[in-house]
Image (cartoon, helix red, strand yellow):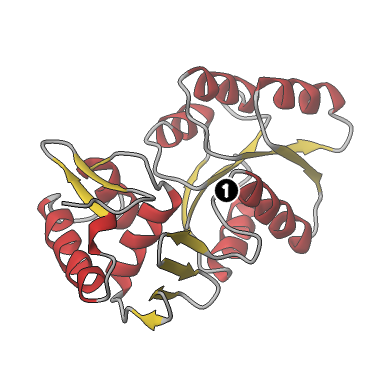
Amino acid sequence: MRVLVVEDDTSLLKVIRDIFEGEAFLTDAAETGDEGYYLAGQAIHDLIVLDVMLPGMSGVEIVKKLRAQSVLIPIILLTAKDAVEDRVAGLDAGADDYITKPFAVSELLARSRAVLRRRGTIGQEGDLTCGPIRLAPAARDAFSGETPLNLTTTEYELLEFFLCNKNQILTREQIFDRVWGFDSGSATTAVDVYVHHLRKKLTANGAGTFLRTVRGIGYILKGEPNVQ
């Protein structure tokens, strides 16, 4: 999974990044509201952790703009202990939860898991599923039924992104930014190559028809097989 952390305190930003990376999240970061809003608008993240007080656009403004654009990624706000009005404004704008500073590592992770469960990004036991396809993020294992798929690291990240956004069309650009990263030296043609490899493994294990090509746009993982 991929998380975006927007926090202008460099030391706290590093701490939060380390927390999520220790849980095997891919992590992007921004230190200003404008940069955070731009990255959030790419719609490649599974979770956004967003400070309220930021240089430029505030956290509450970012939430309002994202929700107005139907960006439904779960958002957790970071607020000062006495900033009741900010918390209320953020929740009213569409944030999913808030954490007051200072906070414990266990609280941040527990609240993150809770909002991901509520949004359906992870199941009650933490697995991601679509038909017979199942991903166990804690162990980074992938299965079709009970058969291990034996995915490479890139194939795993690709399948995880599809499962986090099942029944949604994903463009090649979205997939590339999510799996390879904004600063990758690879080309977007890598998306087609790795989708081909992933589909071969799914097909060999009876699940290839769930992953479909949307001509001229990208791909979609559908909850029902594509019956020819």
Task: Give the class, few, some or many, for how many residues have Cα within 10 Å of label 1's Cα (few <14, many ≥20).
Answer: few
Residue sitting nearer the eye, 112 or 118: 118
Q: Quadrant of residue 130?
A: bottom left
Residue under numbered circle 1: 120
Given the current orientation, which residue lies at the most extreme right position? 82
Q: Is residue 89 left or right of residue 215?
A: right
Whether residue 16 is situated above or below residue 60 in the rendered picture: below
- Percent across and percent down for residue 69 are 45, 20
Quarter assignment of residue 217: top left
Give the residue at x 30% y 39%: 169
- Image location of residue 134, percent across then percent down: 44, 68
- From this viewpoint, which residue is outermost toward the front? 228
The correct choice, above or below, for 101 with respect to 89 in the image is: below
Residue 179 makes an appearance in the image:
yes
> Residue 198 appears at what percent x and percent y?
22, 67
- Residue 80, how many percent across, how many down? 81, 36
Question: In the figure, 192 relative to 61: above or below?
Answer: below
Q: At 48% from the left edge and 29% from the top edge, which residue is drawn?
A: 71
**Can residue 56 be seen?**
no
Residue 113, picture quadrant: bottom right
In this image, 100 relative to 185: left or right? Answer: right
Left or right: residue 205 versus residue 125 is left
**Count of marks, rendered view:** 1
Q: Amino acid at mark 1?
A: Gly
Going by the image, does 8 lie left or right of 224? right
Residue at x 52%, y 38% (from the top left corner) = 73
At 70% from the left edge and 52% from the top edge, which residue is drawn?
Answer: 114
